[in-house]
Image (cartoon, rainbow, N blue to C red):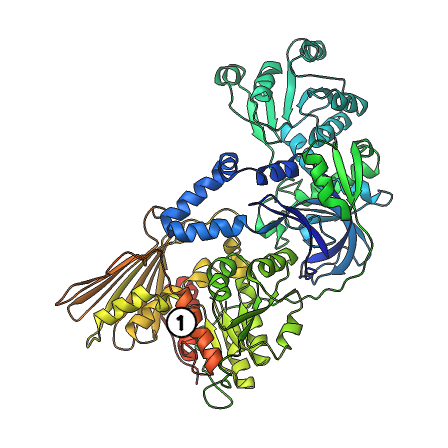
């Protein structure tokens, strides 16, 4: 299928051939009929992409702050790779469309194949021939509403949420500053609510359009006509509400709002304009400044948008989806007319040229639609529900002896497939593999078409697809990397093992003991134990050298591991604990595996406590020789403090690791790491080298399967220990 994409580094726009997205549960696969270009939001993004690196930084100071924080935490080289990787990737455009339901995922019962729906979201309603859309981001189109009009649903919801924030009342007077697409819709919604509207825009054509759609008067912001109209309509008191629907860097809109608003009036920011509020003017009138968050309640909440958890109507009357449905209803009944806003309809094949014309000013438009051709496509759907955890450590049983693979010819490349191509895969794994001799990147599999296309372009995969079964059935593929979201790791690993593939799965291996048992059942059924979990820290050259310098020990050891994890960004999928497990279940295996490797044993019990009101955890692991490891996993520390510090004490010796930057051993002779490494090497490169070697030679896997299972079980036991308030014994299954 085709999709409009942009490279934010170079500014390149392209109509790219990408794989068809999969149809996941709790959503529908939609074939686009019309999608709407937001001439404000999207052109701003297109313009930013054409800027120099300095210009990009100036336009997005919020992103610059994140980069500086990453430098403090991860160092300059790792941050540079991460930032440049993101910049030099294709990103999608679009967020408002109408289309026909092509396939219905499990759990959906309000629409069927063939129904017309309006869709929202800058990750789900893209300028693409097919999109997977979760249930709270689509709404059925009422009978009689044309598809090209229904494509306005998302921008209509943005305008509607702004009007709701203004709490307009029958008979009031409102001022709308900025008569672009959103402003024109705000004018109509206010007029339909019985509010008299004055509009402001420097473009006479837009002023004339707004007056034709119901505004009482419109004019240039610098003209006296606007102030005269406001004075006449309000008896000199000023407007009840001001809606800021303008963009740009001028502070004129907020100054005009203060001048024309009445005492204790309301100012609602809908667009993205400069907001240097003149303090005296806003203070003296005690103006109520409000912000309108996109489509309405539910926006940016992953539980609402991705998991489909609705807000009770008794508590939240107008959610994101209800706003969408309401706007469609108003349009169907003629209370809102979007036809006069359509300046141009372009065929989807002409998308790149259309953006160019808009950017260069050749095409003057309020709203532009893409019209899509009809075509057929097939999709697939797979998903695995998570189940409740248990504590028994499953036994590793093999149908034969310990697994080994046939030795490959020395010059035959190891052919790899990737299932998933997210940020970790593209920044920490694929760069090492792409430049490794004797490795061939065969196929990348994703459910999101664009990420597959990006990975194929950047790393040279021979193929990109959404068909997992075809990859598992391809006998020429030697190993499969599972680098998807946590909830799918166990099932994908199980399928790959049963298909006879050597598997590298990122942590965690499983979210529950039952999932872990399912993986081991696949090992027993197939006799294939060729499995590696991405516990990379034991492969760190600095830590390996420190362990060697520490030497053997004779008595019990005490290990302290401080993990300054920090706060997660709002909207991070790590916060989706219902679907993806707790944050520690997702990440904690790293630290347990490192401790167990340093202590040369697997834990026999786990005790965990948490401080009230946050995610700070204290975890004590006990080992067979009475050694202990204490892991402090904290989210409330200073962001500038190193993420990982470790001390190992035994037999009169101390090993110290400082965030994989330096290490030291205090014994009869003191050892210090000879020099600062160029970057924090947490072992990914060495881990991948060991994995590829095992695949090529058929030799033992880098980490015994029993150790991987023990670490996973100990990680899962943390949550059980928190609930029970007592140590959890890790008893092997009999």
Q: Quadrant of residue 188?
A: top right
Report the front residue among 246 and 215: 246
- Quarter occupied by the N terminus: bottom right
Q: Is residue 708 left or right of residue 174?
A: left
Q: Residue 263: image x %, image y %?
A: 58, 15
In the image, farthest residue toward the left: 668
- From what the image shows, is residue 42 above or below residue 520? above
- Quarter occupied by the C terminus: bottom left
Q: Quadrant of residue 40?
A: top right
Near mark 1 (Cα within 10 A), the count class, few <14, some 14-19 or many ≥20, is many
Q: How many marks?
A: 1
Identified at 26% across, 65% down, the residue is 559
Report the front residue among 410 and 537: 410
Identified at 53% across, 76% down, the residue is 413
The answer to whether residue 264 is seen in the rendering is: no
Please name the residue that numbered disc 1 is placed on: 711
């Amino acid at each position: 299928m085709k999709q409009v994409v942009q490279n934010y580094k170079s500014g390149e726009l392209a109509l790219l051939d990408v794989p068809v997205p999969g149809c996941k549960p709790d959503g529908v696969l939609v074939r686009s009929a019309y999608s709407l270009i937001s001439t404000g939001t999207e052109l701003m993004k297109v313009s930013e992409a054409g800027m120099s690196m300095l210009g990009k930084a100036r336009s997005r100071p919020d992103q610059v702050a994140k980069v500086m924080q990453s430098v403090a935490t991860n160092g300059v080289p790792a941050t540079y790779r991460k930032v440049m990787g993101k910049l030099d990737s294709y990103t999608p455009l679009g967020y408002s469309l109408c289309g026909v339901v092509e396939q219905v995922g499990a759990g959906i019962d309000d629409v069927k194949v063939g129904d017309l729906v309006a869709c929202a979201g800058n990750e789900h309603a893209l300028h693409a021939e097919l999109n997977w859309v979760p249930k709270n981001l689509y709404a059925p189109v009422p009978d009689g509403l044309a598809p090209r009009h229904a494509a306005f649903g998302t921008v209509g919801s943005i305008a509607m949420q702004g009007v709701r924030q203004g709490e307009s009342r029958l008979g009031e007077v409102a001022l709308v500053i900025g008569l672009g697409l959103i402003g024109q819709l705000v004018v109509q919604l206010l007029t339909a609510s019985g509010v008299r509207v004055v509009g402001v825009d420097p473009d006479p054509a837009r002023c004339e359009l707004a007056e034709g759609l119901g505004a009482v008067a419109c004019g240039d912001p610098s003209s006296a006509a606007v102030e005269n109209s406001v004075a006449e309509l309000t008896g000199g008191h000023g407007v009840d509400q001001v809606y800021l629907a303008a963009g740009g860097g001028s502070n004129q809109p907020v100054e005009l709002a203060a001048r024309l608003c009445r005492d204790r009036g309301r100012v609602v920011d809908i667009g993205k304009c400069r907001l240097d509020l003149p303090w005296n003017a806003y203070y003296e009138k005690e103006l109520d400044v409000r912000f309108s968050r996109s489509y309405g309640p539910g926006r940016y909440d992953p539980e609402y948008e991705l998991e489909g958890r609705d807000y009770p109507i008794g508590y939240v009357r107008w959610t994101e989806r209800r706003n969408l449905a309401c706007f469609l209803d108003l349009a169907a009944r003629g209370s809102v007319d979007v036809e006069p806003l359509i300046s141009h309809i372009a065929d989807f094949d002409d998308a790149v040229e259309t953006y160019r014309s808009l950017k260069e000013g050749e095409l003057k438009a309020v709203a532009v639609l893409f019209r899509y051709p009809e075509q057929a496509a097939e999709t697939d759907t797979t998903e695995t529900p998570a189940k409740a955890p248990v504590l028994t450590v499953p036994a590793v049983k093999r149908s034969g002896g310990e697994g080994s693979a046939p030795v490959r010819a020395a010059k035959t490349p190891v052919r790899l497939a990737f299932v998933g191509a997210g940020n970790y895969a593209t920044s920490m794994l694929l760069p090492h593999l792409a430049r490794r001799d004797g490795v061939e990147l065969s196929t990348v599999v994703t459910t999101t078409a664009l990420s597959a296309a990006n990975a194929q372009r950047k790393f040279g995969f021979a193929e990109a697809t959404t068909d997992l079964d075809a990859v598992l059935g391809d006998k020429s593929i030697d190993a499969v990397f599972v680098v998807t979201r946590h909830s799918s790791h166990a099932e994908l690993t199980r399928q790959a093992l049963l298909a006879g593939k050597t598997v590298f799965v990122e942590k965690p291996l499983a979210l529950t003991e039952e999932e872990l048992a399912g993986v081991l059942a696949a090992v027993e059924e197939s006799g294939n134990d060729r499995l590696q979990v991405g516990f990379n820290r034991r492969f760190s050259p600095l830590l390996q050298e420190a362990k060697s310098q520490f030497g053997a020990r004779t008595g019990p050891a005490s290990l302290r591991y401080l993990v300054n994890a920090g706060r997660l960004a709002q909207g991070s999928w790590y916060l989706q604990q219902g679907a993806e497990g707790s944050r520690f279940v997702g990440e904690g295996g790293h630290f347990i595996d490192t401790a167990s490797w340093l202590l040369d044993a697997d834990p026999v019990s786990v005790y965990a406590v948490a401080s009230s009101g946050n995610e700070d955890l204290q975890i004590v692991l006990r080992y067979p020789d009475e050694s202990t490891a204490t892991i402090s996993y904290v989210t409330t520390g200073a962001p500038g403090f190193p993420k990982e510090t470790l001390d190992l004490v035994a037999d009169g010796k101390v090993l110290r690791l400082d965030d994989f930057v330096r290490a030291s051993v205090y014994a009869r002779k003191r050892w210090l790491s000879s020099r600062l490494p160029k970057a924090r090497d947490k072992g990914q490169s060495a881990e991948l080298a060991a994995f590829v070697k095992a695949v090529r030679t058929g030799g033992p896997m880098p980490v015994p399967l029993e150790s991987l299972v023990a670490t996973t079980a100990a990680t899962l036991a943390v949550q059980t220990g928190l609930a029970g308030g007592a140590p959890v014994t890790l008893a092997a299954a009999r």
